[in-house]
Amino acid sequence: MYEYYFLFALALIWAGFAAVQDSRTREIANWITFSLIAFVLAYRAFYSIYTNDISFFLYGLGGVLLFTAMGYLFYYLGVFAGGDAKLLFGIGGIIPYISLRDYIFYGLGFMMLLFAIGVLYTLIYSLFYVKKNFVSFKKSFAKEFRLGRIWIYVSAAAFAALLFIDNVLIAYSWTVLFLPVLYFYARAVEKSCMIKMTSPDKLTEGDWLVDDVRVGRKIIKKTVHGLTYEEILLLRRAGKKVLIKSGVPFAPAFLISLIIATVYFLR
């Protein structure tokens, strides 16, 4: 297990860099994400040569490929930004796989941990947005609640049914009951706090458009990839403000998850 100390230390340091940069600029530089992948695979390759054990490298490469696939999946689903997805690639190579089963048990286990931490972190972080935009948030939340109140009735019925079936399910029952409220909350935060009219001089590559934008005869479409440099130049020449959807800097959730995973894997 000692051979993994360097890998986890490397990932923690790089995730720390990413968390600081993401919190300050809402971006994660490619040098952070790609250098993590390079160092992880290089270390595994050299260690495999030193110990004459090629499996150490191959399992790590498999982890990188697995997390790359999941990173792209969540990127195109709009769950992760590009920097978050690329940070995930390298993390896939540090986990101590010793069998194919470990890809499911440890690999997917880390993803479940990341999403659990991510939900809690995002919920806490969003409270700062709500505090700054409380009046507009309150109106938006009331509207979402009114339009989706049918789901409150459905979840209440499911809550009662689960309690009736088995009292052991009480913890899951409360989760079912509050899911619609959390959904209304997230929708209200996004609409009232995370969508802003932005001047073209403040746009950066990767910013997400809320709607397609017409500039002269050209239409700039909203995509999962965000604005390109050429599209930003076009908007600046036209002096056109656009609605941009911002997100919560997610790299700190990676760092927290890695700290927990380090304690678990290297205990």
Image (cartoon, grey):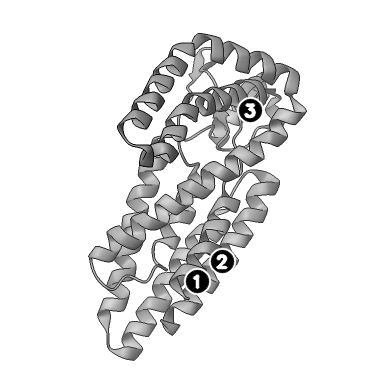
Element type where label 1 sits in the image: helix
Residue drawn at x 47%, y 42% as measured from the top left: 80
Q: Is residue 147 left or right of residue 200?
A: left
Of residues 88 and 127, the one nearer the viewer is 127
Q: In this image, 94 relative to 248: left or right?
A: left
Residue 36 is situated, as x and y percent measured from the top left of the image, at: 49, 65
Residue at 75% x, 30% y is 131
Q: Are marks 2 and 1 in contact (CB under 8 Å)?
A: yes
At horizontal 46% and vertical 27% (from top left) the residue drawn is 177
Task: Name which residue type carries label 2.
Answer: Leu
Residue on which the image places disc 1 = 8
Q: Quadrant of residue 193?
A: top right
Task: Provide the residue designation for mark 2.
Answer: 12
Helix or strand or loop: what does disc 3 sit on? loop
Precedes in sequence: disc 1 or disc 3: 1
| CA distance separating discs 2 and 1 | 6 Å
- Residue highlighted by disc 3: 194
Mark 2 or 3, nearer chain start: 2
Against 242, residue 131 (above or below) is: below
Asked if 181 appears above or below 71 in the picture, the reply is above
**What's the CA distance linking mark 1 and mark 3?**
34 Å
Q: Quadrant of residue 144?
A: top right
Residue 239 x, y percent position in the rendering: 69, 20
